[in-house]
Amino acid sequence: MKELVIGASGLLGSYLFREGRMFGTYTHNQLPCLIRCDATDLVALERLIERIKPDIIYFPAANPHVDWVEVHPEEAKVINVDAPLGLIRVIRGRGIKLVYFSSDYVFAGSSGPYGEEDSPSPLNEYGKQKYFVEQQIDQYLKNYLIFRITNLYGFEKRGKNFAQNLICQLRVKKSVRVAKDQVSTPTYVPDLARAIREIAVRDYTGVFHLAASDYLSRYEFALGIADIFGLERELIVGVSTSELEQQAARPLQGGLISFKAEKLLNRSLLGVNEGLSEMLLEEKRYGRIC
Ligand SMILES: NC(=O)c1ccc[n+]([C@@H]2O[C@H](COP(=O)([O-])OP(=O)(O)OC[C@H]3O[C@@H](n4cnc5c(N)ncnc54)[C@H](OP(=O)(O)O)[C@@H]3O)[C@@H](O)[C@H]2O)c1
């Protein structure tokens, strides 16, 4: 079985890429063993697929910066919407399985955590773009998986994810304001990548929620990070989301329940204490980035 990760240089993509003998692409963040491919260039994308002839394409490629997407909806659409729609056209009728990544931001965040049966009603542009692509995939493809995921954390050289970024700020004694009223289900990326692959290589199709089950606020999560990494809790200041004045509205009571996936996998994903402890070990193994 041949597997291709489009966006293997990002947080989730890089861990997926390590799950097996895969082909992977980057766009700006060049890494060894990855092929350059801009997914917004449909001709290049089609050529790559013709050459590799994958059975499964994982598509974590996106611009997931929610506030940026809110302010630049048309520019964001090029990679977040047009690229996956182009990919649908390229693979339609070829039997290739598409594994796409959506978010709990497709929900309004008034009654999370959400199960697969709940109705999407996105609050912001990023959530709307994700939900639109989900609908297009469902309309045009049969052999697909859509994983809705949320609040990813893990050791990351580029330090973009919330946990990694917070660790770096606290290490230089910077005070950080964190929302007390945004509740979700933070998910450890290496564990998530393992679970995604386990489901993807089997015959399953459809929409799956995939997240850990600890349900906590960003503030509580931040305190947990400080405790496990031996950093000063006092630097973390709990505030309300409105005080952060973010450009995009946030679903406050978000998060996901992984009903279907837990049944298939016969396990739940790692809780926050276990995930953060593994992240600390990863940092020791690969060396601190900050
Ligand atoms: N992180 C989260 O908490 C979270 C939560 C819910 C859903 N998701 C979704 O999960 C997926 C993965 O998120 P992530 O956090 O791993 O994102 P990420 O770290 O920002 O990685 C994004 C990837 O997309 C690639 N990319 C960007 N523009 C591209 C283009 N024009 N053509 C091809 N590839 C391109 C990037 O390549 P270069 O870096 O080489 O440019 C990178 O490999 C996204 O769909 C995101 O919306 C993430």
Image (cartoon, rainbow, N blue to C red):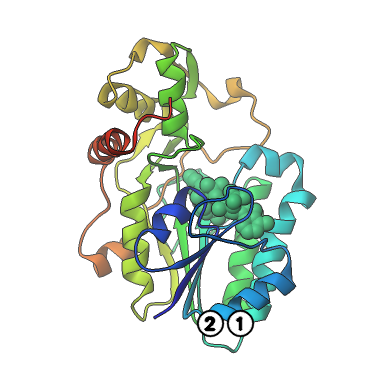
Quarter of the figure with the C terminus: top left
Tell me if residue 152 comes above or below residue 160 in the rendering.
below
Residue 13 visible somewhere in the drawing = yes
How far apart are the two marked residues, 2 and 1, measured between alpha carbons? Answer: 5 Å
Label 1: state its secondary structure: helix
The disc labelled 1 sits on which kind of residue?
A: Glu
Residue 259: % across, % down: 32, 62
Tell me if residue 260 comes above or below residue 174 in the rendering.
below
Residue sitting at the far left: 266
Tell me if residue 228 comes above or below residue 213 in the rendering.
above
Query: Which quadrant of the structure image shows residue 147?
Result: bottom left
Label 2: state its secondary structure: loop
In screen coordinates, is 167 left or right of 65? left
Within 10 angstroms of label 2, few (less than 14), some, or many (20 or more) residues? Answer: some
- Answer yes or no: do the residues labelled 2 and 1 have beta carbons within 8 Å? yes
Residue 234: % across, % down: 37, 10
Residue 75: % across, % down: 77, 50
Along the line of sight, which residue is nearer the eye, 40 or 246? 40
Tell me if residue 261 comes above or below residue 205 in the rendering.
above
Query: Which quadrant of the structure image shows residue 288?
Result: top left
In screen coordinates, is 285 left or right of 27? left
Q: Residue at x 42, y 17 (%)?
A: 170
The disc labelled 2 sits on which kind of residue?
A: Lys
Within 10 angstroms of label 1, few (less than 14), some, or many (20 or more) residues? Answer: few
Residue that label 2 marks: 53
Specify whether tag 1 is near ligand 1 (CB below 8 Å).
Answer: no
